[in-house]
Image (spheres, helix red, strand yellow):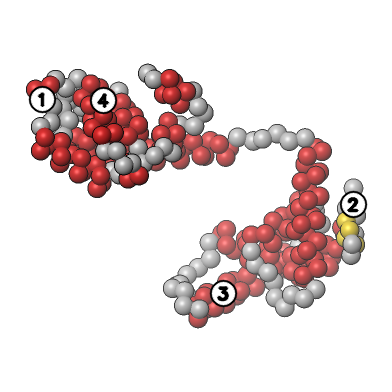
Amino acid sequence: MKKNEVAISHRSEPLELVYSKQTKIRDIDDHSIISNMINYLYVLLNIKKDNQLNEIEESVLNGLILNNFKNYTTDEIKHAFRLAVAGELNIEMYQKLDSVTFGKVLVNYRKYKELKIKNYIMTKKQKKVEITQVERTEIELQFVENCVIPYIEEHKEMKRPLINWATLAIFKHFWDRKSIKISTDEIIKFKALGEKAFKEDLKKQRSEGVRVDLEQTMGNRTSKLYSSCIALYYKIDDIIELEKIKEMGWDAKQ
């Protein structure tokens, strides 16, 4: 294994992601790199000289690579074949290299790669980064200054609830601080208003030329978005009183 391959193998990212960040075949000018890759595959598959591709067959394979697999890198293709030889791609491998074998390996590798990267991303998301209480307080203060107070100022001029994910984050902020009190009747009311606002937004999108299904129903996530933003709109005065938010600052209750 070459020195750069050793370095790559010790990175925390999956090799499928590391190799895919290199220069793609579509972007290389020197096509001898492809020939060198094919020679590597001959050695990997233990293909003797007499069984290697002739000039016409290699030209056909090059055309397949340039037309159908140009978004891969040569190192990634080598990696795919190493996986295939090791039995990781669940396909039978022989001492043979042609367009059919090449296509079979890369098609199975693509599925393998997608799953590997998906699992990596999900694992990364699940890892919790511990932060100190001081850092947590600083983050909260910045959120209040940059998001909460501007919303309160803009609320004075709002003609209708502002529906977006940033507003939902503000709602969650106050909800976690137990500064929002919502009765059962109010929950029903805000959900109904959310459904109505959702339908109105669909009609607006349609009038602006967006192709939307006016009969589509709200999913749970969208329903939560609309009803929470609407609840914040109608309950903000009560929240201000509880949180003692002043015109030029923040005096959070402890």
> Residue 146 at what x, y percent from top left?
76, 57
Could you tell me how far apart the alpha carbons at marks 4 and 2 are, in whole angstroms? 68 Å
Q: Are marks 3 and 4 in contact (CB under 8 Å)?
A: no
- Element type at mark 3: helix
Q: CA distance from mark 1 to mark 4?
A: 15 Å
Residue contact between numbered discs 2 and 3, judged by CB atoms under 8 Å: no
Taking the spot 35% from the left edge, 44% from the top edge, the residue there is 27
Q: Amino acid at mark 1?
A: Asn
Q: Is residue 215 above or below residue 112?
A: below
Callout 1–callout 4 Cβ contact below 8 Å = no
**Residue under the point 78% across and 39% down:** 135
Find residue 177 and report its horizontal and vertical position in percent. 80, 51
What residue is pinned by disc 4? 40
Q: Which residue is mark 3?
A: 201
Q: Which residue is mark 1?
A: 51
Tell me the residue that label 2 is attached to: 253
Q: Secondary structure at mark 4?
A: helix
Q: Secondary structure at mark 1?
A: helix
- Going by the numbered disc 2, the residue's amino acid type is Lys
Q: CA distance from mark 2 to mark 3?
A: 37 Å
Residue beneath the point at 25% across and 34% down: 32
* Position above or below: 90 against 142: above
> Of callouts 3 and 4, which one flags the residue occurring earlier in the amino acid sequence?
4
Q: Disc 3 marks which amino acid? A: Asp
